[in-house]
Amino acid sequence: MSSVDEILAKVLEPDNESIRTGTAELKEAMKRPTICPTLLHIGKYSTSPQIRQYALVLLRKRLSKYYHWEKLTVDFKHGIKSGLLDALTREPEISVRNSAAQVVASIAKHELAERKWPELLEFMQQLCCQGKPNEKELGLYILSIVADSAGEEFKIFLKPFVSIFHSALQDSNTTSAYYAGITLKNLIPYIGTDEATMIQPLIPKVLIVVRNFIVIDGAKAVNLMEIWEELLETEVSILAPHLKAVTELCLEIASKKELDDAIRIKALSFIATLARLKKKSMIKNKLVSPILQTLFALMTEADEEEEDDDDDEYDQVESSKPCIVAAQTLNEMALHLPPDKVITPLLQWADPAFKGSDIRAQQAGYTALAVVVEGCAEHIRTKYMAPFVQVICSGIKHPQAHVRNAALYAVGQFSEHLQPDIDKYANDILPILFEYLSATVNSLASGKKVPRSVDRVFYALEMFCETMEAKLNPFVPALMEHFFIALNPVYPFHVKELALSAIGATANAVGKAMVPYFGRIMEHLKIYLSGQLTEEEMPLQIQALDTLGVIARTIGEQTFRPFADECLNFTLNLVQSKDDPDLRKCAYGVFASLASVMKDDTAAALPAIIPLLMKAVESNEGVTVATKDDDDESAFPAGDLLDDDEDVSPMDNEDDDESDGAGYTVENAYLEEKEEACLALRELALQARGPFISYVEQCSGPVYKLVDYGHEDIRRAALSALTQFTICIGKQPNGEQACLAALAILIPKLSEAIHTDSEIEVVNEALDCLTELLKELKGVVIKSEGHLDAILMCVKNVFNKATQCQMMEQAEEGNEEEDDVEDPDSEASEKLIEYAGDVLPALGNAMTPLEFAPYFAGLLPSILQRTKKHCTIAEKSFSAGVLAVCMEPLDGVLEPFVPHLYTTFTTLMRDSDSEVRNNSVFGLGELVLHGRELLFPNFPQILQILSNALSRETNPLALDNICAAITRMIIVNISAVPMDQVFPVLMSHLPLREDFHENSSVLKCFLFLFSNGHPLFASHLPQVMNVILTMATQQELQPEQKPMINELMAHIASGFPDLYNGWASALPAEVQQKMKEVLA
């Protein structure tokens, strides 16, 4: 039998056969009871430094498990501990010594918790107090490793080491000072109040050490700077007195172009973390303005070698340059700070840039607008919309590519986050984009190099078009002409890929209006989907598959159904024949889209589809486990040799395995595939409920496990899928008992997510799931004991900002020194409260009014407090909106609420913001409709209020809701409405302009007047018919409106045949045809 050192030598030989043989022998050797002392002996005395280090790596791997350490004899333990300390003092090779220190740290985790290794503490103290720099450095290095692996166990011994830290940090440019700082960094996650008091005086010294190491060793400076973020995230009180100094140092570092990018980026990372976790301190210390000034200056930086490039560095999303990270940091500030605290100071630098001639400053200005809009959308919408759009349109036409690309990026971002208001500028923006796209295509036709900036114009077009819906219809012919030109075979693959994506975005917006182009689109898609493509062409095939899914979902069932079976079979064959996560992701989207077309006809394909989706749900593909191994240890094959742990006790501490782990990462493509698989399952449960019910049990368990997944998008998708599975069960005949069983699992999980998840978007999703469950399943959701209380507690705690994600944002409220600082919410937090508000009317509609009233009463004060004069526009708009939609579920029991509600609605109708006014007048109309006689005494005052509002209102939505409120008053109590004055005014403001949902109220009013034979209705019949004509042929009809139009036109045709026939015959032929389709 070979000795262990001989075996290690075999494994390290650069020969495959030797490695194979040595590995097999080593696996057997690792089972010997004396392996640990043997490895230590080799680690100390082998003549080969590489073998010494390998032996120590294996020893650490083995002893990191508590079970393996505990089963050693006392003598073996003592020998290993003393032998390791001896090795540390006598080992000449740094890499070997470092590996020995790692073994010491692993054992310290087991021993220090039981105060069993005082010799280690004495050893470290003696080394750290030595006058020789090398010994002092070694002692602090060991201390830093022990603090990293056994910080929780070591902290009780911290006190005698504090003076050592003070001394080491005093020599601020030495390696000992560096290790002292790293030790503090490693201890921070474990310290409490007592330890914080000891550590706080060290922070100024660490600040000096960081400043010195920026010059001495950039990589070490980056490691040291992590201490600031650790303190922000775990023990902020230590940092609070020094926060301004640390921030100013980080701004200074970020501003120095001569420093390495890694150091500057680490400084910016602290600023981003500060914005997320300490916005109040940022404001209190007057740091916002200097931070924004620095970020803007960084965003104007450019690489000299890129100055002549047609593109800009902001296109390089994955790049890590200070200018890009500065933009990302600005985005973080916009997301977490109150919007006025960001926009107002930012304009101090952006405005002069737009008016000046500095190209890079202009580029930075447009990029700044682009990255702040997500977090400041409401603020921009209400205060800066017109001037910002104007300046962006100017930027799109700029002759310099850097500026133009940044402006195009801003168009895309504005289009994504400022709907529907941005649509009003379509006539200003789209022609410019068309012109730029045409010029780009022409340049490609002449054989010029394809600039990456072509992505920008397609991105801007996609974002702008995708959310316009029917308002995009007039522009579709021009759009499609440009896109089809770009699909010409002479153009590069990437341009065709972008054109296909843009076609999908257009289809998302206009739906059936794409029917005239359907045949031509499918011809192009078949080319890229059916051919054998090269690896270079694969992105084009993936995009074609994605666009196919969009077309299937939007073009209309009647148009696409003849192609559905062929597309389904083709997609199945494609995904089974090619191993690519991006392609699979798009295929799952196609499955979901086809389900919306095929409905229960999807049944035949489910046996093939479900296993594909579940494989993605359960897959660990793309997962990479990160370890804490030093770089010089990572080359040693150790992990596979230690898996043979069949004798490990079931009581072994599960956490022991984490001693080597530093978490895991997952490739984005696999994350997106997993998310899309969940969403596809959700869609199948929604669209093909009958056949999918057989798969619910099979799918639920694996999807449920993803609710706690490490990535928030996966958690969101999993919650959404589980919600639809539960609805699928509840919609089955005799499915109530099974549904109750599913709800017994899902409601607590949603409640847990709402209360404990740190990501606002996940909490939003969980609240949305509650709303959807209540809308679809009604009272079944709250039938089981505890569910109603759980849902109400979720809403109440969000309103009171008592959930984990809200408390993280408000974490510093406990600092007495900051209590005087105003603490407005970020827009993301306000959005969260809106999601909670949406649960309330859904809950009301799942109960009787009498049952709902006391719960509404309990939450009413929380809603009313957000209607005060000092509240934000978002708060007032939300409050008016949620109160308005709660009127229907309170029908018949509104009496105790009328005084508060009436005052609230009529007061907010005078607000300066149109959305607040719109929601308030809608609420007043709903209060009238459902309060009936309770409001009769107020009718004269209400009519006067509406009349005044009608005379001064300019917003189309608000005008539409004023008209709808009048129709409700007529329906509820026509005798209290002076019809000869009111009805002509009402008709003069019809048809409605934007709020086509309210056409239902108008039609109900018309039907009411006709059925009562009101003379004013007859005298206004020509106007009435023209209003109905506009509804039917030019506006988007709701499902309930078509039957009302049919009924009303039938009444008019039979009651006033001559008038009706004369009116109908005068219509143009194409309009008559549209009317026939509606009346069919």
Image: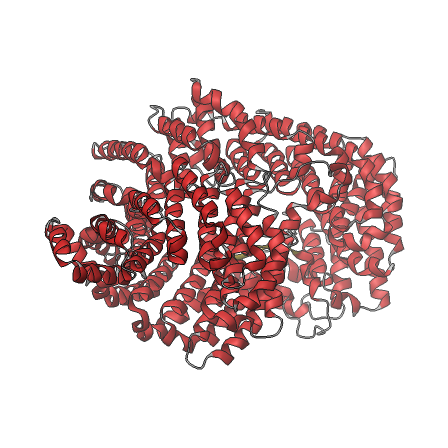
Tell me the residue at 83%/57% (across/down).
Answer: 112
Image location (x, y in percent) of residue 729: 45, 75
Q: Quadrant of residue 136?
A: top right
Of 918 and 715, the residue lying toward us: 918
**Identity of the residue furthest to the bottom in this view:** 734
Of 626 and 870, the residue lying toward us: 870
Q: Is residue 690 above or below residue 441?
A: below
Q: Is residue 599 visible?
A: yes
Of 439 and 584, the residue lying toward us: 439
Q: Quick one: quadrant of the N terminus?
A: bottom right
Horizontal side of 651 relative to 125 (left or right) equals left
* Number of dots carrying numbers: 0
Image location (x, y in percent) of residue 244: 71, 31
Q: Quick one: quadrant of the C terminus?
A: bottom left
Q: Is residue 622 visible?
A: no
Q: Quadrant of residue 641?
A: bottom right
Q: Is residue 346 above or below residue 500?
A: above
Judging from the image, the colouring scheme is: secondary structure
Of 832 and 134, the residue lying toward us: 832
Image location (x, y in percent) of residue 1062: 11, 52
Image location (x, y in percent) of residue 961: 40, 47
**Identity of the residue furthest to the top in this view:** 357
